[in-house]
Image (cartoon, rainbow, N blue to C red):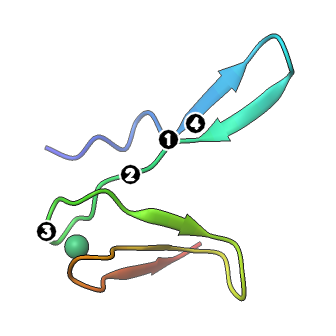
Amino acid sequence: MAEINKLYEYDYKTGTIKLKNKKCPRCGSIMAHHKKPVERWACGKCGYTEFV
Ligand SMILES: [Zn+2]
């Protein structure tokens, strides 16, 4: 059900790792990644927050 196996995408050209959005385990919406003030994943729909 959850697609948490592809959170990162490696860019071979620039050598950077991109973080992909992941789905909310509660409602299934795409979660947003925030770095400040605390690094976390937050769901804008149901308010679910997962701290990194
Ligand atoms: Zn949610």
* Pointer 1 residue Cβ closer than 8 Å to ligand 1: no
Q: Residue at x 22, y 65 (%)?
A: 25
Q: Secondary structure at mark 1?
A: loop
Quadrant location of the C terminus in the rendered image: bottom right
For the residue marked with disc 3, what is the amino acid?
Cys
Q: Residue at x 72, y 88 (%)?
A: 37
For the residue marked with disc 2, what is the amino acid?
Lys
Rendering coords of residue 39 (x, y %): 66, 76
Rendering coords of residue 34 (x, y %): 61, 71
For the residue marked with disc 4, what is the amino acid?
Tyr
Cβ–Cβ under 8 Å for marks 2 and 1: yes
Residue farthest along the front direction in this orientation: 44
* Pointer 3 residue Cβ closer than 8 Å to ligand 1: yes
Rendering coords of residue 36 (x, y %): 72, 81
Q: Quadrant of residue 50?
A: bottom left
Q: Where 49 sits versus 29, above or below?
A: below
Residue farthest along the right direction in this orientation: 14
Cβ–Cβ under 8 Å for marks 4 and 2: no
Say which mark, if any, is on residue 27.
3
Q: Residue at x 49, y 41 (%)?
A: 7
Say which mark, if any, is on residue 22.
2
Cβ–Cβ under 8 Å for marks 1 and 4: yes
N-terminal of the pair, mark 3 or mark 2, is 2
Q: CA distance from mark 4 to mark 2?
A: 10 Å
Quadrant location of the N terminus in the rendered image: top left
Say which mark, if any, is on residue 7.
1
Say which mark, if any, is on residue 8.
4
Q: CA distance from mark 1 to mark 4?
A: 4 Å
Cβ–Cβ under 8 Å for marks 3 and 2: no
* Pointer 4 residue Cβ closer than 8 Å to ligand 1: no
Q: Quadrant of residue 16?
A: top right
